[in-house]
């Protein structure tokens, strides 16, 4: 099975923000170490890094007219913050991997979605 | 259908279906095949006689139906390849080669990636062998809603890759708790009045105890269900709830209470001190005449530590009052953050009454009446208020 893991940062401190600077060096290192371990897990494929949700522009077309709004489709806190892929035997393995993504324990959540094959 | 045939079907459905899912790796296909096999049996057995080994007959027939179905369906060519290999090695099905995969099935149905109402419905459908319309009736939802719920759950199992297996050791405690929660929820739905669900939950509990004989919490839950269910007949009188100490004990099923105590003893012997074992011990103590309220209060204290539940603390207060410590009980009740819960006010009213604080007791019972939903509970409270006036 292949899964896409959608990372919603929620209130998770992310690099480049004040909240991130308020973390201790040790806490910052733990986040980096967690991602490093994920990257080394067999079956794991990282996604590309996305800039913060505040930089998003949302586009919709109504009656042939392109409408844009500032910000993500959902509230900033609920916005997609990143993604990755994982090839695993079953959902249990994907859930265990998702639980190792720092956002899952730091104020965000990870959505596990099977990929159509 | 004759009664015996229906009985065989009810007993065999879960095992036959579990084995088929394990064999085919496909929930929906397995269920369709099982259904066809049971329909075939209903037609043939009364005519040709029940086969010597009904289960083997059902499994073989269902497997053959499934294989036929796959052969017809060209798009499942890959699955056919897989099946061909296994069919040659498992051509003749006899009792000894049918693995019991009900445990794998129950852990799949109670997987936390499924919504709780779907876990409950799926468990009743697959393991319990209840029909969709029966489950819908039991949970007071339209049959179409229940059918949709079941289909969606089965699709998610397949699409999301929910495994068909007993979880590995590091996941087992959490997953077992989820399974027990589902079975106990089914029991409580039944305890509230729909007796067939309570019986079904006990059947599931017995199956779990047979499949996981060394899990104390399984024994504890089975014991708890058996003892509570044994008092069913005495719980209501003229549509009003009857409190335990006022129940007519001649209506209790004493044999069932004894078998509940046996299960509890097994759970305790296995070193069980979990929430179900403690609740079962409490149920057993409540069935004693007279109940040992000191011991009961102590066990509620233990349960409150395990669960952190204020409702358990409320029960501890009731037990404390029975030991004579009414003031202490009232102080405990008044510390609890349960203002929206009618039992809190009913208990408070009862304690105040015992302390001869009649006006306050009346206020508490009236508050309880505002919050109560069940008619049977309402009648009990109205009775208490009337006594207060008299």
Image (cartoon, helix red, strand yellow):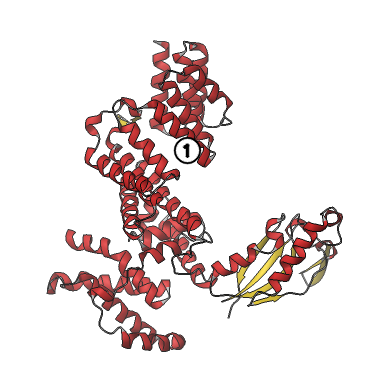
Q: Is A9 left, or right, of B76 in this rendering?
A: right
Which chain letter goes with mark 1?
Answer: B
Q: Position of residue B349 (x, y in %)?
A: 48, 20
Q: Quadrant of residue A63?
A: bottom right
- At x 26%, y 79%, the residue is B93
Check the picture and name the quadrant holding the C terminus of chain B. Answer: top left
Q: Nearer the viewer, residue B17 or A63?
A: B17
Q: Is A1 left, or right, of B379 in this rendering?
A: right
Q: Nearer the viewer, residue B309 or B155?
A: B309
B46 over B189 or under it: above or below: below
- The residue indicated by pointer 1 is B303
- Callout 1: 10 Å neighbours few (<14), some, many (20+)? many
Q: Position of residue B173 (x, y in %)?
A: 48, 56
Secondary structure at numbered mark 1 = helix
Residue B242 visible somewhere in the drawing: no
Q: Position of residue A49 (x, y in %)?
A: 79, 71
Q: Nearer the viewer, residue B362 or B113?
A: B113
A27 over B386 or under it: above or below: below
């Amino acid at each position: 099975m292949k899964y896409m893991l959608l990372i919603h940062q929620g209130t998770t401190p992310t690099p480049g923000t004040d909240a991130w600077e308020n973390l201790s060096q040790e806490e910052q290192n733990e986040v980096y170490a967690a991602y490093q371990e994920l990257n080394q897990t067999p079956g794991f494929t990282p996604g590309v890094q996305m800039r913060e949700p505040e930089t998003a522009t949302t586009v919709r077309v109504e009656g042939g007219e392109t409408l844009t709004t500032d910000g993500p489709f959902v509230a900033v806190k609920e916005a997609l913050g990143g993604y990755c892929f994982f090839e695993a035997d079953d959902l249990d393995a994907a859930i265990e991997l998702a639980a190792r993504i720092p956002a899952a324990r730091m104020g965000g959540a990870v959505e596990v979605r099977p990929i159509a094959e | 259908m004759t009664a015996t045939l229906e009985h065989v079907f009810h007993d065999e459905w879960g095992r036959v279906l579990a084995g088929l899912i394990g064999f085919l790796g496909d929930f929906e296909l397995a269920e369709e095949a099982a259904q066809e096999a049971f329909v075939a049996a209903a037609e043939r057995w009364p005519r040709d006689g029940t086969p010597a080994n009904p289960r083997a007959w059902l499994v073989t027939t269902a497997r053959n139906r499934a294989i036929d179905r796959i052969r017809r369906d060209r798009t499942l060519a890959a699955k056919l390849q897989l099946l061909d290999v296994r069919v040659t090695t498992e051509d003749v099905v006899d009792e000894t080669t049918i693995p019991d995969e009900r445990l794998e099935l129950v852990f799949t149905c109670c997987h936390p990636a499924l919504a709780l109402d779907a876990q409950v419905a799926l468990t009743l459908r697959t393991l319990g062998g209840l029909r969709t319309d029966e489950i819908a009736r039991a949970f007071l939802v339209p049959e179409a809603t229940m059918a949709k719920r079941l289909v969606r759950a089965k699709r998610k199992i397949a699409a999301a890759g929910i495994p068909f297996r007993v979880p590995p050791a590091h996941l087992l405690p959490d997953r077992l708790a989820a399974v027990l929660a589902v079975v106990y929820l089914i029991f409580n739905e039944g305890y509230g009045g729909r007796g067939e669900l309570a019986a079904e939950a006990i059947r599931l509990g017995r199956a779990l105890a047979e499949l996981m004989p060394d899990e104390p919490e399984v024994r504890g839950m089975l014991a708890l269900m058996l003892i509570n269910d044994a008092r069913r007949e005495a719980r209501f009188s003229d549509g009003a709830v009857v409190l335990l100490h006022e129940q007519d004990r001649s209506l209790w099923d004493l044999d069932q209470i004894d078998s509940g105590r046996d299960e509890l003893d097994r759970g305790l012997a296995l070193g069980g001190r979990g929430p179900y074992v403690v609740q079962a011990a409490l149920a057993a103590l409540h069935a004693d005449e007279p109940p040992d309220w000191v011991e009961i209060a102590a066990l509620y204290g233990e349960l409150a530590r395990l669960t952190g539940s204020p409702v358990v603390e409320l029960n501890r207060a009731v037990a404390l009052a029975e030991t004579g410590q009414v003031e202490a009980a009232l102080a405990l009740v008044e510390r609890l953050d349960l203002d929206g819960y009618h039992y809190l006010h009913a208990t408070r009213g009862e304690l105040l009454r015992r302390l001869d604080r009649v006006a306050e007791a009346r206020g508490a019972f009236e508050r309880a009446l505002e919050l109560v939903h069940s008619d049977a509970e309402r009648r009990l409270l109205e009775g208490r208020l009337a006594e207060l006036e008299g």
